[in-house]
Image (cartoon, helix red, strand yellow):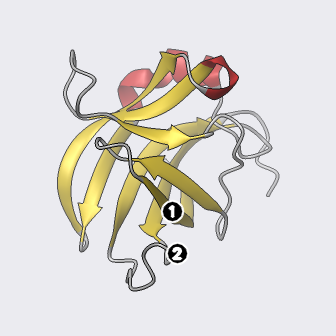
Amino acid sequence: MNRGPAQMFRITLQEARSREAPTRDGASGYEFFAPLDAAGHIDLETWKKERARCFVHRLDHGAIAERGLLVHRAGGAGGATWAFDYEAGTADDEEQGYRFASHAFEPGEYVSVRDGEGTLHTYRVSAIHPA
């Protein structure tokens, strides 16, 4: 999907079945707001200008279980990590996007998120809408 210059999108991730979790039903996941460039990648420069609008909702069976922000941290693969931060000032609660900087967010694609305990979970991009 060619989107043109980076703009804000609402991205919905649904938990996906995997070898480790074959019974997942897609009822949990995330909804987050991020600027995507024409190729579907999170655009760092636009995020810097719009970070206050980059919310995340962790969903549990369709209900918002936790609210936070999409943050960019130094370190990790490629020199930086995108994470979902639920409490400012502490890193204990963060969930890290696995290689979010290199993923193209397109409906049907799969991405992974590492939870606070370090376990990697797979999600399917189920929807993307302009925000």
In the rendered image, is residue 48 in sight? yes
The numbered dot on residue 32 is none
Image quarter in which the N terminus is found:
bottom right
Mark 2 Cα shell of 10 Å, populated few (<14), some (14-19), many (≥20): few
Mark 1 Cα shell of 10 Å, populated few (<14), some (14-19), many (≥20): some
- Residue nearest the viewer, comparing 112 with 86: 112
Q: Classify 23 as above or below 43.
A: below
Which residue is pictured at 21% across the width and 20% down the height? 90
Label count reads 2
Which residue is pictured at 75% across the width and 34% down the height? 5
Determine whether the residue tagged by mark 2 lies in a helix, strand or loop. loop
Q: How far apart are marks 1 and 2 (CA)?
A: 7 Å
Which residue is pictured at 40% across the width and 77% down the height? 26
Instruction: Say which amino acid is labelled 1.
Output: Thr
Which residue corresponds to mark 2? 18
Sequence order check, earlier mark of 1 and 2: 2
Determine whether the residue tagged by mark 1 lies in a helix, strand or loop. strand
Q: Do the residues labelled 1 and 2 touch (CB within 8 Å)?
A: yes
The numbered dot on residue 122 is 1
